Image: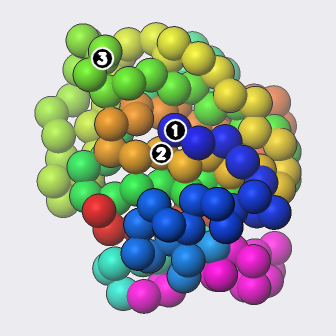
Amino acid sequence: MILATLAEADRYAVLHPLFPRAFEFLRNADLMTLAPGKHDVQGEQLFAIVEACDSRTRAEAKLECHRRYIDIQLVLEGMDEMGWKPVAACLDPATDYDAARDIRFFNDTPSNWIATPPGAFCLFFPEDAHAPLVGTGMIRKVVVKIAV
């Protein structure tokens, strides 16, 4: 799990061959005008999902993880207090892994909460369970999905 700003993103570009393109998209696309939903960047290898919704409470948030994709979750508006816990430490699965949606949920409580303001992103790898969209009021963000 990484918490950083786009100004610091270049130091993480070497971690995956698609990260430079992902950060280029985040820097150059007019993210505030993108409609909620899925947006193609580079086919199923790299795409973005824009979310604009009311936040939820910590109690309502479920930890989730992905096997096929890495997430870069950039907050555009609002404060997203994302929960985090290593998948290896999650002992109470809420669902089986759904391969079609690339997601599994857990009932475990996050071990940390990361207050992520506008302009900052959290980068979650497959070993990172995360509980996003926690806060008060509306949160607008873009989640870039990068194929592992």
Q: Which residue is mark 3?
A: 90
* Dot placed on the residue nearer the N-terminal end, 1 or 2: 1
Tag nearer the camera, 1 or 3: 1
What is the x, y in percent for residue 102? 26, 53
> Which residue is located at x 40 percent, y 35 percent?
128
Circle 2 crowding by C-alpha within 10 Å: few under 14, some 14–19, many from 20: many
Say which amino acid is labelled 3. Answer: Cys
Q: Position of residue 104 (x, y in %)?
A: 27, 37
Callout 2 secondary element:
strand
In three-dimensional space, the C-alpha distance between marks 1 and 2, rounded to whole angstroms, equals: 5 Å
What is the count of numbered marks? 3
Residue type for callout 1: Met
Residue at 83% x, 56% y is: 119
CB within 8 Å, label 1 to label 2: yes
Mark closest to the chain's N terminus, 1 or 3? 1
Dot 3 lies on which element?
loop
Residue 32: quadrant of the picture: bottom right
Residue 27 at what x, y percent from top left?
Answer: 75, 77
Which of the two discs, 3 and 2, labels the residue nearer the N terminus?
A: 3
Q: Which residue is mark 2?
A: 124
Is there a contact, CB below 8 Å, between mark 3 and mark 2? Answer: no
For mark 1, what is the residue?
A: 1
Amino acid under disc 2 = Phe
Magenta stretch bounds: 24-42
Left or right: 95 in relation to 31 = left
Look at 57% across and 26% down and name the residue there.
Answer: 83
